[in-house]
């Protein structure tokens, strides 16, 4: 089976398969149309007034945009997925370890997403939860099977539909509040601190954002990749937060689907929720397929089907028993992205050797130590947890590369090319 049909799971994307600005933008906006961002926006809406909410979202998305834009540049410049990029930084076996964590987490979130669709729709319509899980899981897996092309088509449909239906719900909420000026005057019953608010904003998507290169590697140029990524975060992610926040401010509910149910918009709510989770889950299944394909060397398409089946079958169990564990595991993902960025831009000065001609070391100890340090910083240091993890991981990796024993691994063995 050709690498093209496998969406280049084991090699750089060819020049013939590269895309222009608009397809990359649509996929990236669909990527940021993330249900968890709406719920996070609802949490912010319950703890901040509207002006404070806007400031928080602007700062949070600026930081997210900077983080993901660096990864977007790497993906487009090299044509490599996150999992193949990790081999340069973590080594051949070390890269497989990071891919295992990244991919397994996404399969888990896929299952949780299926349940997140089925449960509220069951509550609103009475349709069997198990039937909804099976149908939605099958459809989401089917589109993910066809790779980047299917993600593009789905995003072309989902992005405008979600924007229009969500926008209509927001208009209903603002009208019921007495207009925009009345909305601006709403004060929360209990407030949340600035650091907590920024942590919620960044934390809602930075784990998924770590896999940005999996999509932007198809961009024709790094400029296209970065501009599409920045617009997606400032447009798509901000819109998701706003949908959640305004609904929460007016109704006290942080879930836009529940807000729309209260507004009597049952069918629009089902469509909005379904398309939103569909785009999110397709992206999760797609990147998990790339991850396990890089680990096993097997067909990405077959692995997507297996992952989709497992996520669907265990959806309700994952939702009821695994969300806390997945959230904890997600704290391990941003340090990986930070180490990739530090290695590529600061240590390698934006240059990686040809992937096909590179012999990788088994493990790069500095990257693994930095990864552990980043997870610890995110878990235990005060302040903004995701930023703590990213900064500490990047700084640790760069500093350890100044130590002779680590320099040998990075500069001689990891970058050694075959004659």
Image (spheres, rainbow, N blue to C red):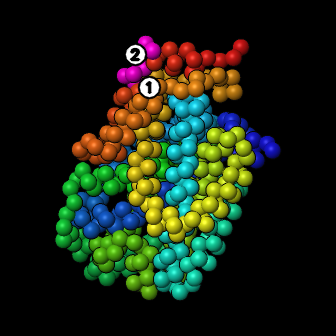
Residue 383: x, y in percent? 24, 45
Of 362 and 257, which appears nearest the observer?
Answer: 362
Residue at (26, 54) in percent of width and height: 196
Does any portion of residue 29 appear in the rendered image?
A: no
- Say which mark, if any, is on residue 403: 2
Which of the two labelled residues, at mark 2 and mark 1, occupies the earlier sequence position? Answer: 1
SS majority, magenta: helix
Q: Is residue 377 left or right of residue 336?
A: left
Of 22 and 407, which appears nearest the observer?
Answer: 407
Residue at (43, 82) in percent of width and height: 261
Q: Where the C terminus falls, by quadrant?
A: top right
Q: Is residue 2 above or below residue 199?
A: above
Residue at (51, 52) in percent of width and height: 105
Residue 387: x, y in percent? 33, 42
Which region of the structure is painted magenta? 398-405
Does any portion of residue 201 appear in the rendered image?
A: yes
- Say which mark, if any, is on residue 366: 1
Residue 400 part of the magenta segment: yes
Q: Where the N terminus falls, by quadrant?
A: top right
The crowd level at tag 1 (other Cα within 10 Å; few <14, some 14-19, many 20+) is many
Q: Is residue 270 above or below residue 33?
A: below
Secondary structure of the residue carrying numbered label 1: helix
Residue furthest right as drawn = 1
Task: Verify CB contact (< 8 Å) between mark 2 and mark 1.
Answer: yes
Residue at (54, 27) in percent of width and height: 363
Q: Is residue 253 above or below residue 76?
A: below
Secondary structure of the residue carrying numbered label 2: loop
Q: Alpha-carbon distance for marks 2 and 1?
A: 9 Å
């Amino acid at each position: 089976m050709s690498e093209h049909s496998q969406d280049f799971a084991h090699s750089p994307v060819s020049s013939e398969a590269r895309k222009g600005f608009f397809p990359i933008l649509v996929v990236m906006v669909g990527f940021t149309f993330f249900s968890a961002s709406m719920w996070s926006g609802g949490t912010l809406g319950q703890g901040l007034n509207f002006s404070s909410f806007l400031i928080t979202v602007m700062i949070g998305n600026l930081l997210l945009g900077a983080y993901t834009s660096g990864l977007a540049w790497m993906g487009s410049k090299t044509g490599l997925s996150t999992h193949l990029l990790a081999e340069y930084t973590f080594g051949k076996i070390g890269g497989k370890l990071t891919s295992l964590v990244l991919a397994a987490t996404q399969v888990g979130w896929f299952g949780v997403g299926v349940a997140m669709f089925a449960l509220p729709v069951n509550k609103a319509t009475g349709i069997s939860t198990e039937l909804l899980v099976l149908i939605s899981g099958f459809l989401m897996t089917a589109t993910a099977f066809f790779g980047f092309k299917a993600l593009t088509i789905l995003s072309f449909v989902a992005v405008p539909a979600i924007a229009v239906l969500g926008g209509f719900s927001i208009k209903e909420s603002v009208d019921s509040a007495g207009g925009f000026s009345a909305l601006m005057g709403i004060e929360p019953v209990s407030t949340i601190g600035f650091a907590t608010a920024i942590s919620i904003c960044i934390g809602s998507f930075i784990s998924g954002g770590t896999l940005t290169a999996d999509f932007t590697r198809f961009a024709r140029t790094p400029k296209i990749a970065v501009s599409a990524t920045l617009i997606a975060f400032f447009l798509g992610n901000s819109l998701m937060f706003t949908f959640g926040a305004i609904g929460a401010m007016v109704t006290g509910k942080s879930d836009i689907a529940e807000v729309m149910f209260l507004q009597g918009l049952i069918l629009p709510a089902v469509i909005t929720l379904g398309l939103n989770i569909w785009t999110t889950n397709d992206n999760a299944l797609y990147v998990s397929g790339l991850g396990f394909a890089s680990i096993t060397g097997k067909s990405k398409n077959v692995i997507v089907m297996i992952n989709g089946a497992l996520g669907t079958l265990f959806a309700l169990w994952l939702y009821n028993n695994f969300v806390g564990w997945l959230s904890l595991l997600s704290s391990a993902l941003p340090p990986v992205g930070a180490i990739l960025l530090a290695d590529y831009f600061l240590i390698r000065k934006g240059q990686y050797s040809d992937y096909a001609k590179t012999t990788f070391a088994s493990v790069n100890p500095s990257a693994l130590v930095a990864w552990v340090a980043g997870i610890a910083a995110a878990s235990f240091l005060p302040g903004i947890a995701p930023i703590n993890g990213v900064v500490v991981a990047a700084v640790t990796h760069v500093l350890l590369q100044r130590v002779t024993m680590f320099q040998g691994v990075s500069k001689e063995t990891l970058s050694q090319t075959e004659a």
